[in-house]
Amino acid sequence: MKSEFIKVLIGLAAIIVGGAAEEILPKAAEVGVPLLMASSVFMAMKLQVQATVMFAIAAGAVEDALSGLPPATSSSFFLAVAALARWSEFPRGALVMAYPLYQWWLWVWTGGAYGVLFNRMLVALPMGLVSAFAAWTALAWLERRAAVDE
């Protein structure tokens, strides 16, 4: 029971800090750092299925609110990425490849309002790699410090 409560607190902190960091950190070619998506993939590996669904929807809703996107644009993609990472052999690879696909997803659902798709996808690959490493390292450290599995 204690570890589940701690996981919920870590998830809440990941959403708050990840959303704030996405707003504060600089963007390259209008592509930000996908910390909320990386957090949803990390939490998909740690939580049960129902909690994973709720976390992905919450993280996607925060992403939509911060970016001014239509409702459920990011939530639906975050759910798909969390499911792919949960049942894939290499969840970090799923996350790294998911961010360029997320740029395509945004281009499809928003009518291409965010600039040249090809440039955004080229920048999204290294941004996804860096954010996956940063988010997984920070959340794993926080989980160890909180002694979740002990």
Image (cartoon, rainbow, N blue to C red):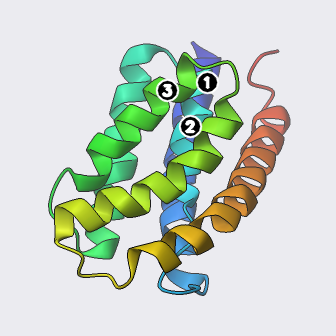
Q: State the image quarter where residue 111 is shown.
A: bottom left
Could you tell me if residue 102 is visible in this image?
Answer: yes
Image height check: is 61 above or below 41?
A: below
Whole-percent x, y for residue 67 in the image: 32, 74
Q: Of the residues shown, which amino acid type is indicated by label 3? A: Leu
Q: Earlier in the sequence, mark 1 or mark 3?
A: 1
Which label sits in the foreground, 2 or 3? 3
Whole-percent x, y for residue 131 in the image: 68, 60
Q: State the image quarter where residue 149 is shown.
A: top right
Give the residue drawn at x 56%, y 28%: 85
Give the residue drawn at x 49%, y 26%: 84
**Label ID, residue 84:** 3
Q: Are marks 2 and 1 in contact (CB under 8 Å)?
A: yes
Question: Dot 3 surroundings within 10 Å: few (below 14), some, or many (20 or more)?
Answer: some
For label 1, the SS is helix
Q: Of the residues shown, which amino acid type is indicated by label 2? A: Val
Q: Residue furthest front?
A: 118
Location of mark 1 (residue): 45
Location of mark 2 (residue): 41
Whole-percent x, y for residue 106 in the image: 30, 63
Q: Earlier in the sequence, mark 2 or mark 3?
A: 2
In front: 9, or 66? Answer: 66
Give the residue drawn at x 68%, y 38%: 93
Question: Dot 1 surroundings within 10 Å: few (below 14), some, or many (20 or more)?
Answer: some
Which label sits in the foreground, 1 or 3? 3
Give the residue drawn at x 59%, y 85%: 28
